[in-house]
Image: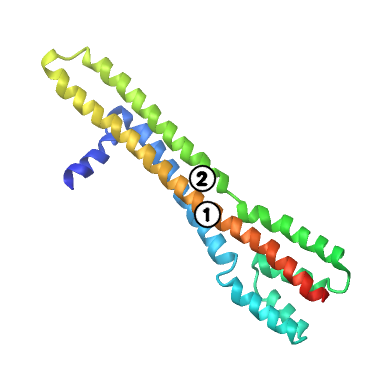
Amino acid sequence: MQQFFSFITTGFRGSGAPVMFVILVILFAAIGLAIERVWYLYFKCGLNTKSFMNGVSRYLMAGEIDKAIKLASSVKWPIAKVVSVVLNNRGKGTKAIQRAVDEVYLTEAPKVQKFLVFLQVFSNLSVLVGLLGTIYGFMEAFDSLANIPAAQRAQALAGAIAVVMSSTMWGLIGAIFAIFAHAILSNKADKILEELDEKSLKLINLVEE
């Protein structure tokens, strides 16, 4: 365990330290962005939208539209905003309701997809900065080998390789995290937007009937 910890921290020593700190900044930025998106997509967009929609449907089937509107107004989820505009525009015709839903969608969709593209940017930057640190480390290592006795070159080269490989490893760690987070969060965002389309259409049909 001590040897592993020593290896992963070798990149922070010597002239390669600035590159390593850049990689860490990228990694922490990706982690912070992922946490913010998890909070928004999994909590602020609704923990149990299925139960919410079941409640709205029960009120509508019972003819208690005012209670359905009150329920929709009690939360700030995207799906609740869609329900509100559908119910508040009932009786104005399908086209009018659809226009109101489209306005909500155009407002909420950018919020749902916000910042996700930056996770892809962070993954690419992490890899590229890691490779940059590796190349720079090798250039510096081979340059320094020319100034030491031949008997010490093998040991010096081994130490230099450990340092530059640490840079590559941290770059890959940052990239792997960003790619994984982007895949999970993008999938969740797509499901939220698909749910908005599906539920709004079903609700419009139910209200019109």
Residue at the farthest right position: 92
126 displayed left or right of 202: left
Q: Position of residue 139 (x, y in %)?
A: 32, 19
Residue at the farthest left position: 151
Label 2 CA crowd tier, 10 Å (few <14, some 14–19, many 20+)? many
- Is there any visible trace of residue 29 in the rendered image? no
Which residue type carries mark 2? Leu
Q: CA distance from mark 1 to mark 2?
A: 10 Å
The C terminus, quarter of image: bottom right
**Quadrant in the picture for residue 7:** top left
Mark before the other along the chain sequence, 1 or 2: 2
- The residue to which callout 2 is attached is 119
Label 1 CA crowd tier, 10 Å (few <14, some 14–19, many 20+)? many
13 displayed left or right of 28: left
Q: Nearer the viewer, mark 1 or mark 2?
A: 1
- Is there any visible trace of residue 22 in the rendered image? yes
Q: Position of residue 81 (x, y in %)?
A: 71, 68
Identified at 52% across, 39% down, the residue is: 121
- The residue to which callout 1 is attached is 185
Q: Is residue 116 above or below residue 85?
A: above
Q: Position of residue 72 (x, y in %)?
A: 69, 75
Which residue type carries mark 1? Leu
Q: Position of residue 175 (x, y in %)?
A: 43, 41
167 displayed left or right of 179: left
The answer to whether the residue labelled 1 contacts the one labelled 2, judged by CB atoms less than 8 Å apart, is yes
Identified at 26% across, 31% down, the residue is: 163
Say which element carries label 2: helix
**Quadrant in the picture for residue 43:** bottom right
